[in-house]
Image: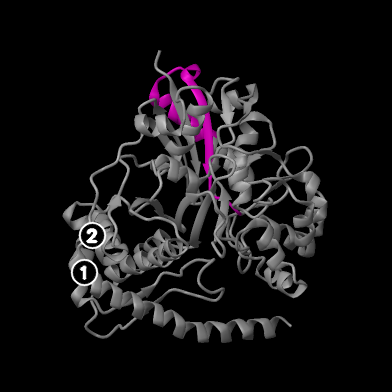
Amino acid sequence: MTKYLMGIDAGSTSIKSVLFDEAGNVIASASSESMRFKVRGKGFEEFGVDDLWVSTSKCIKETIQKANIHSKDIVGIGVTSFGNGLVILDKDGNSIAPGAFSHDYRATDIIELYKKEGSLDKINEITKGALFAGEPGPILRWYKEHEPHIYNKIGSILMFKDYIMYKLTGVFATDANVFGGSNMINIETLEYSKELLDLYGIPEMFDKLPKLAIEPTEIIGMVTPEAENSTGLSSGTPVVAGMMDILSCLVGGGATNEGVITAIAGTWCINETHSDRIIPNASANMPYLTKGKYLNCSYTGASGANYEWFTRVLGGSAKMEAQNRGVSYYEVLNELIDLVPIEKAKVFFHPFVAQPSVHVEAKANFFNIDQNTTYAEFAYAVAEGVAFMHRHHIDFLKSAGCPANKIRLSGGIARSRVWGRIFADVLKLPIEVVDCEEVGALGVAIAAGIATGLYKDYDDAVNKAVKILPAIHPNPSTFELYDERYQEWHQLIEVMNIYWNQKNQRVAEHQH
């Protein structure tokens, strides 16, 4: 009998349900669009919590129907999603407010409040990360300060993926990676901390925290009869604790060996590796796959999101050409990017369409535009700017002593050989891509496979289920030119910092 694993990758732009066989082959998949609500104020990025389950259950049912298998042949289920953001429920498990995405920054004033209270540095010391407005602690404090009628009804706090797990199993549970990466636990002890919640100013929430699984492979519950009716899954199917999507991409990308840096060019600009130590000033030091190991991260809030913005707002001519030629829109963009050799590049792009970024007031910018600037140069500048942002973070990890022999690239742009070439030359390292378009779902399916005995361990799973495409090697003749442009790109950030600081000061004065 063939055994299958299901991985559910719930992102901020879509939810995907993917069925894999033991060899990591995609048998069937289904996806749904984002449930994003209309923005109700500055910084709000929200979704319908009930809509999240409706979309997920439809995806699961459609995947099983497409695969034409018996659901009893699915031996385990894993769920992954972005970290941060928030889902809050009442004591009966019902939604009482819209969910918050990780790039929600309504709580920017709360971060300033923590600075004034003197608690921000203490929070970062306990969590070994860098707190930002889109994380559960500040958002919960925002509710306490601004919407106490909701805050006082909170019965449970969950992450995006945890809510799906709750609807599958009826169990309020999370995992150490996603909660630790969201600055909600003591990273050294891997336990909840009353001191931490006191510093957040939300001590009432300690008893609202979900069951905490230390490792992604821990089985937190079984599919309930109610979930069976909604999804077509078989009741009694094990569901594992899972992990944040960035760790799931590392596992699904087979980057568990030393010296491999995982770069995720998706909604966020994620750069990560793993070690047995906590790196000072990292964006996050999350729990890794086993206790005593850490996922060392350096990131900002926009990578491929810049490309998504660019194609939506400035992509008209490329779309028309693609339509006329009957080819993919992205194929046309790749051709345009490829038209601009590094020695002729003039335009710079700061890829700051989303927060958190290099500065709370940072916004995206094009520089060095004149009447001769072509659309191709704009497209190239976006690709180069995103690659530069990844270099900024990877340089930090390397300076902290993390070995970097190769880059395992995933995310929406990973399939483009043109983008891969730019990344290789900018980072001066080979770029490798996994022969699977659903890397995040594969990673969490692997965790379910280990939990249910389909794989012995992560090494066994990677050997059996992860296939790496031929590497894109860097061209040393480009290094000097890219170094010069990277330094100029960084210098422009320093210049803009003067303006951003002044703007931040004006905003603060206006609020008072």
Q: Is residue 240 left or right of residue 91?
A: left
- Decide: few, some or many residues near mark 2? Use Cα within 10 Å; few <14, some 14-19, many ≥20: many
Q: Is residue 386 left or right of residue 74?
A: left
x then y, percent, for residue 86: 65, 51
Residue 279, percent from left and from top: 54, 59
**Which residue is denoted by mark 1 in the rendering?**
478
Q: Is residue 349 above or below residue 336?
A: below
Report if residue 65 lies within the magenta region: yes
Kind of element beneath mark 2: loop
Query: How far separated are the C-alphas under marks 1 and 2?
Result: 8 Å
Which three-letter amino acid code belongs to the residue tagged 2?
Answer: Pro
Which residue is at 40% across, 43% downward?
A: 257
Does 228 appear above or below 447? above
- Position above or below: 112 against 139: below
Residue toward you, 425 or 412: 425
Q: Is residue 82 magenta?
A: yes
Say which element carries label 1: helix
| Circle on res. 59 | none
* Above-or-below relation of 208 to 418: above
For disc 2, the marked residue is 474
The colour mode here is one colour
Q: Which residues are magenta?
A: 57-84
Depth check, front residue: 65 or 281: 281
The answer to whether residue 340 is visible is no
Q: Residue at x 52, y 33 (%)?
A: 78
